[in-house]
Amino acid sequence: MSKGNLVVKTNQLNSALQNLSLPEIRIIQLAIVDARETNTGLSTDKPLRIDALRYAEMFETTRQNGYQRMKDAEENLFNRRFSYVNEEGKIVKSRWIQEVTYLDDEGAIELVFTLAVVKGISRIDGAEDFFTSYLLEQTASMDSIYSVRLYELLVQWKQAKNTPMFELEIFRSQLGIESSEYKRMGNFKLRVLDLAVQEINEKTDIKVGYEQVKKGRTIIGFKFKVSDKEKPKSTQNLASGRDGDTSDMFAIEGLNDKQLGRITRNKQFIADYNHLVSSTSPAGQDSKMWEFEMINRLKKDPSQFKKRPIREYLEY
């Protein structure tokens, strides 16, 4: 799995009872990804910067709209609380954010997370057996917050193929549903569960299905089956109109993030592609943001870098 845009959270934090909106959860996702990819890391005393341009490009909106969404989401997120069960079996309550700074003239915000959140997020390579991991791109196009939350809950069971029973009331809380919402089972399944399952199956890398668990005639929970989707052959080549049997001069397969970073820092690469970003954008003003932006673009669509074979930049 590519490390680009990889979100990694402890299963304990991932299963915490929470009620985040879609823009709020996207800020959490971006923070996790950016802390990892920029080597900034997360701490309780060092702010993490999130740029509106980054949000806008990831979630397909304008920079101005992205900044406003981030500010609105942060204001709500600042007041949010979540709870989890610690190693001693005791319920712990925490907030998500302890400090925020608005950088209006730069179109960015800086966040400092609480201790519980920092401890619940890891950027350590090789520790992913203990964490829920998924690519940010898998949830970026989702329209329903319930789809995102269900994906996060289910992806940790991908290897096991089957989940234990999700007890109904706890499951509703994990999806962020208030006790007054969708109280009738028919409404819950139609407007929440079935919609989320359909969106996951259409837009992500996993396929899911569920069965109801009953006690008598009453539904008390749900069990899910989770499996990887089969990847179509030569997806990248077919999408770009090239013969699947022809070697792709723009392919980045086999290149790790360190190598991609070397490529984006190459003076010839910068000369060839500096037209892709505005001189006033973060990527146009800061070398680290340039590297971060170009690595993500290379992973998303390497075919836009056509001036010379990508690997040649490793040799210059």
Image (spheres, rainbow, N blue to C red):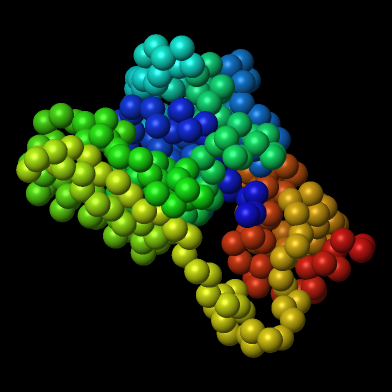
| In the image: residue 155, left or right of residue 292 | left
Q: Residue at x 52, y 31 (%)?
A: 10
Q: Name the image quarter holding the C terminus.
A: bottom right
Against 170, residue 242 (above or below) is below
- Viewer can see residue 276: yes
Question: Left or right: where does residue 141 sit relative to residue 235?
Answer: left
Image spot of residue 247 (x, y percent): 74, 81
- Name the spot of residue 12 as percent of width and height, x first: 46, 28
- Residue drawn where x is 47% and y is 65% of the image: 229
**Percent coordinates x, y for residue 78 in the rendering:** 39, 22
Residue 82 is situated, as x and y percent measured from the top left of the image, at 36, 22
Q: Quadrant of the N terminus?
A: bottom right
> Would you place residue 117 above or below residue 203 in this image?
above
In front of the other: 221 or 144: 221
Between 74 and 154, which is closer to the camera in this rendering? Answer: 154
Does residue 7 lie above or below 235 as drawn? above
Image point (36%, 53%), residue name: 225
Residue at 51% in and 50% down: 159
Which residue is situated farthest in the front direction here?
A: 216
Can the viewer see residue 147? no
Q: Is residue 223 left or right of residue 218?
A: right
Quarter of image, res 166 = top left
User: Is 189 or 269 nearer to us in this picture?
Assistant: 189
Residue placed most toward the observer, 230 or 259: 230
